[in-house]
Amino acid sequence: MQKLMSPDTIIERITGISHKAPAAADEFVKYYVFRHNNPEYTEYQSSFNAAETKLQQINSNLFLVKNTLDKNSATLNASLTTIEDKIDEERRINRALTRQIGTSEQNENGSAEMIHDYTLLYNAQYNRNFMILVGCVGLIAGYNKIFSQPTT
């Protein structure tokens, strides 16, 4: 992995550029107007050239900072891509292991659930059968009472 420039250094460079740029731009505009209005004075021409050189230097410094940021960004993106690939590989391994563990746990839990479900079904059917038996005994007793009365 490439060494990244520290954010503090980049911020210092940007701050320096942002402090120098307005003054350099004002100076450039001032000497541009002077040179344009008085092209015969060489001192205006040399002052204009100096102001133009300052702006170009600020522009080149800004380009260097931008280039450094681009390099840092590309390096971080490459690192993140590598980390993401490793995470994806670990997820695949985790899924495979989870499937293996899940299968055995589901068999154990599934059989326990089946036993529990069938116990509930058995008890419900047993209660229904008992109620049917009580109902039949009650009906037989009721019919017996109704039909066993003497006819007069």
Image (spheres, rainbow, N blue to C red):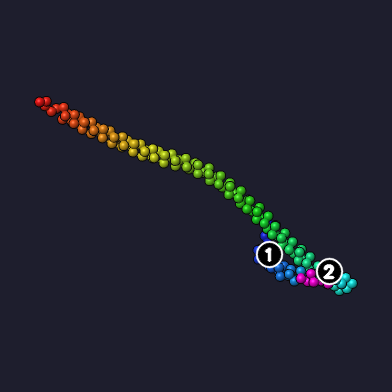
Question: How far across and down, in percent of the image, does residue 10 sit?
Answer: 68, 64
Amino acid type of the residue that numbered disc 2 sits on in the rendered structure: Asn
Q: Is residue 46 above or below residue 109?
A: below
| Residue 30 among magenta residues | yes
**Image marks 1 and 2: residues in contact by CB distance under 8 Å:** no
Instruction: Return the disc, 1 or 2, that comes first in the chain's sequence.
Output: 1
Q: Residue at x 53, y 44 (%)?
A: 95
Residue range in magenta is 26-36
Q: Nearer the viewer, mark 1 or mark 2?
A: 2
Q: Nearer the viewer, residue 114 or 149?
A: 149
Q: Which residue in the protein does label 2 denote?
A: 49
Pick the front one: 146 or 22: 146
Residue at disc 2, secondary structure: helix
What kind of secondary structure does the magenta stretch mostly adopt? helix
Residue ID for mark 1: 10
Quarter of the image for residue 146 reads top left
Which residue is nearer to you in this view: 7 or 15? Answer: 15
Q: Amino acid at mark 1?
A: Ile
- Please tell me which residue lies in front, 151 or 142: 151
**Image disc number at residue 33:** none
